[in-house]
Image (spheres, grey):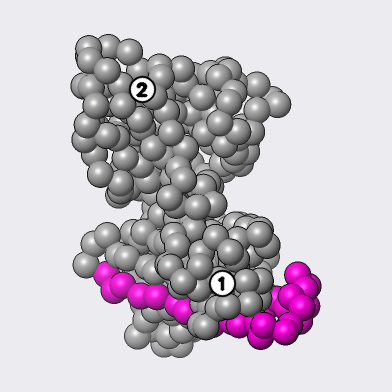
Amino acid sequence: MSTDIPASLPQIIDVTDFCKNGDAPQAALWQGFTRRVNRIWRWNRKEVFRWNGRYSWGSASGTATVNRWRFRCHTGPMAKQFAVMAMVAMDDTKVAVDPNVKVTFTAVGAGVDGSAGFFFGESPSTATVVDAVPGIAIMTSYVTCTADETYEVVWQDKDGSRLVGGCIWEVSKFGSPQNGYLRSGYTIGSPIYDSKREALLEAATNYWNRGAAHLFNWCVDLGASPRTRSGTSSLNLIDDSSSTVSSATPGLVVDLTYCNTLSQAEVPVVFAVYASKDATGTRDGIIVVKNSSGTVLLTVTVPVSSAAGWYTTTGTLPASEAKYDIQSSIPTGGGGGAGPLSVGAVSLYQYLA
């Protein structure tokens, strides 16, 4: 039995075309189901990161390796590679020897690690550096990944390299039964066995739970300069000043319409924060997601004396379009002083374990 993966999006299935009450479903109906699931698997190139830098970074990195951006994501059931696109500008110090950008992928579970390197930008001492083509290069590299795996990713630049922009998305496995795609070559009148129905329903459910959209990333532009909090006031993480939620405060707009299931009124998500909390006092730091009414929907706690790393929580968000604000603070209570809470990055993505 063959595997059929349409190149274009098929029309919506009208079950009345293939099945009537009291009759068994026709093979054509089941073939239509499998073709559509296969297409989602093969061509759903989920974007997990996009960020913009600035041209003034060259002299800041020098010959050292500098951490720029971070994020956390979960790969879909059919992911084979990360496609990594970097926009890099020429060194403007005119002393760089080997300017380069590196993106490192670390699997949280038993998956494979990987990295991508981009080498560009050495400027002769007599050259005039222009922040435009041909002084800018856009390069793409592919990094092998493990399907259905959580990854922690960091962007770095070195030796005067200027990381101007970056984008990362998933690339699916080649479409064949050996890679787990569904066989769809049903002939007219052929029986539809329970095993075929089970395979289709398990595949669709697994992709719904583990392959849904990445929703949001935020990070500081320099890893060594995170957002810090020492007081009890909860402040907006993006503008570093707003204490209340309004339509004017910076946040994330997420459209989760139709992303829930019949059994779930809301959409399951993972909220991940890269942060640390020093040993001063006994009060933990928190990072929260608030809706437009100021209600806290998700909370990540960073305990006292916590080293820099990823801290996560799971929860749900409404199946609708809405704006959310991200705030951080060191709440009152517990006694003792309150040392700094440092936050470097935030990621939010759909996922159901």
Residue 49 place in picture, x, y as percent = 53, 59
Q: Is residue 280 left or right of residue 36?
A: left
> Magenta span covers which residues?
111-138
Of helix, strand and loop, which one carries label 2?
Answer: loop
Using the image as rendered, state which of residue 97 and residue 273 is in the foreground: 97
Q: Nearer the viewer, mark 1 or mark 2?
A: 1
Identify the image quadrant of residue 161.
Answer: bottom right
Residue type at numbered disc 1: Ser
Write the residue at 46% across / 84% down.
Answer: 174
Is residue 208 among the parts visible in the rendering? no
Is residue 293 among the parts visible in the rendering? yes
Identify the image quadrant of residue 85.
Answer: bottom right
Q: Is residue 316 left or right of residue 146?
A: right
Quadrant into which the N terminus falls: bottom left
- How crowded is the residue under tag 1: few (<14 C-alpha within 10 Å), some, or many (20+)? many
- How crowded is the residue under tag 2: few (<14 C-alpha within 10 Å), some, or many (20+)? many
In the displayed structure, 49 sits above or below 309; it is below
Instruction: Kindly identify which residue carries mark 1.
Output: 161
Write the residue at 35% across / 75% down.
Answer: 114
Q: Per the image, is 71 magenta? A: no
Predominant SS of the magenta segment: loop
Residue 8 place in picture, x, y as percent = 67, 74
Of helix, strand and loop, which one carries label 1?
Answer: loop
Q: How far separated are the C-alphas under marks 1 and 2?
A: 36 Å
Residue type at numbered disc 2: Ile
Q: Per the image, is 131 magenta? A: yes
Using the image as rendered, state which of residue 28 and residue 105 is in the foreground: 105
Q: Is residue 249 left or right of residue 350?
A: right
Identify the image quadrant of residue 334.
Answer: top left
Write the residue at 32% across / 65% down.
Answer: 106
Q: Earlier in the sequence, mark 1 or mark 2?
A: 1
Instruction: Kindly identify which residue carries mark 2.
Output: 330
